[in-house]
Amino acid sequence: MAHIVVLGAGLGGSIMAYEMKDQLRPEDRITVVTKDPKYHFVPSNPWVAVGWRTPDDISIDLTKTLQRKGIAFKPVAAEKLHPEENRLELVDGTSIDYDYLIIATGPELAFDEIEGFGPHGGYTQSVCHVDHAAKAHEAFEAFCKTPGPVIVGAVQGASCFGPAYEFTFILETELRRRRIRDKVPMTYITSEPYVGHLGLDGVGDTNGLLESEMRDHHIKWMTSTRVKKVEKGKMIVEQINEDGTVKAEKEMPFGYAMMLPAFRGIKPLMGIEGLVNPRGFVIVDQHQQNPKYRNIFAIGVCIAIPPMGPTPVPCGVPKTGFMIESMVTATAHNLGNILRGKEPDEVGTWNAVCLADFGDSGVAFVAQPQLPPRNVNWASSGKWVHLAKIGFEKYFMRKVKRGTSEPFYEKATMKMLGIDKLKSVQKG
């Protein structure tokens, strides 16, 4: 008998538990450990921040769903992982032993790396967590009473740029609906070397599409920009040359600012040699398995992926939903093999599919594989993207509620694009 523990129950961890359950032998058991008993659909956080959704709209209590699937559930945060002992210490003083551990925690948000940054005692908002988005909505409602300049973007070291673009245009749409857009100068500030880089060196013509959208919506932008510090109503930024020297320092006034932070690994994993890199991200091989601790797997944003190449300001590589789903499927299959005395042989495809909603339109892109050179390198825009994002939200929420594990991105994208085969499992 083997005990499998899934640490984390977000977009990756929840479906990881479902897919892993399907791979277990009758005598095996599975436990999900997470700090929050509720699942939150993170892609809808930008909508929460402008009042188009409430936190309850995008939240699911996992207790009944997991119980119905025969999955044990422990909603207690981790304190420290002890991989040599196959033991996970929890903040309530208890521990849980495992035979196999799947880490799916997502990242820790590094707001503290910039003075005055973030929603916890700082002066900027975030849409990385549903609680942040709810706070951002409160700040937005206050801002609308006395509108002024807006800054949206992503700081140095950020690795998830899609939500920054989404929120820029969603916010712009809501300001137009409230008929106060003419009172709000908007600037997009990013560590990316060019608009539409996305941490992927662009996908299709994301550069041209996003620059065109920004011009059409009267949004200015600053690229290769590092945030030095934030004060009340003022962001001090440095524009960086190609050689890394400072081109100019500017003080950017704002009445409202939402900037995505850099990510790092969670504290319970920090400093475990051979498990994580210096930034705290979990090291995995092509089978999602840690090279040192072979009974530990990891999926999602918490894994270590090196940047595509040097940029004037550091940019991380995003882990999109489709990419995470492929990691989940590969991990479940590989661990299922191990439980039956076989070798892991499935490799996630790591393709990228993204629907970036702009409130009344949007941009979609497909990168196969995620990192260039690619077999599929496609981007498009239109009102259909907004409708597709709504459909995706409804489908995924229903999927989590029902505890189903079938991949969504592949089926939806193949149908949308008419591609015969977008995702093919590679055998190692």
Image (cartoon, rainbow, N blue to C red):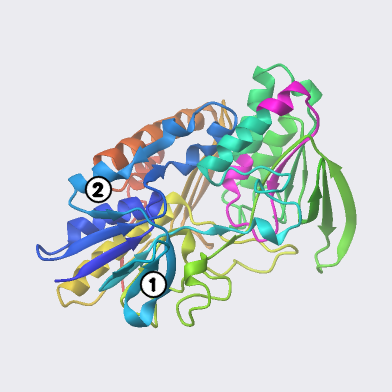
Please name the residue shown 46% across and 82% down the image.
274
Q: Earlier in the sequence, mark 2 or mark 1?
A: 2
* Callout 1 secondary element: loop
The percent coordinates of residue 363 (x first, y second) are 56, 38
Q: Is residue 416 visible?
A: yes
Bounds of the magenta span? 141-165
Q: Is 234 left, or right, of 23 in this rendering?
A: right
Q: Is 349 left, or right, of 155 in this rendering?
A: left
Foreground of the two, 275 or 191: 275
Q: Is residue 153 above or below residue 343?
A: above
Q: Is residue 115 above or below residue 304?
A: above
Foreground of the two, 137 or 398: 137
Q: Is residue 304 visible?
A: no
Question: Which residue position holds label 1?
Answer: 286
* Callout 2 secondary element: helix
The percent coordinates of residue 404 (x first, y second) are 24, 44
**Does the magenta run of residues contain 175?**
no
Q: Is residue 208 above or below residue 394?
A: below
Residue 144 marker: none
Please name the residue shown 69% across and 48% down the image.
121
Query: Residue 299: which quarter of the image?
Result: bottom left
Question: Which residue position holds label 2?
Answer: 66
Q: Which amino acid type corresponds to the residue marked 2 in the rendered image?
A: Leu
In the picture, the quarter occupied by the C terminus is bottom left
Please name the residue shown 25% across and 52% down the image.
18
Task: Quote the CA–CA distance across marks 2 and 1.
Answer: 29 Å
Q: Is residue 298 above or below residue 367?
A: below
Crowdedness of circle 1 by 10 Å Cα count: few (<14), some, many (20+)?
some
The percent coordinates of residue 241 (x first, y second) are 83, 62
**Does the magenta run of residues contain 147?**
yes
In the picture, the quarter occupied by the N terminus is bottom left
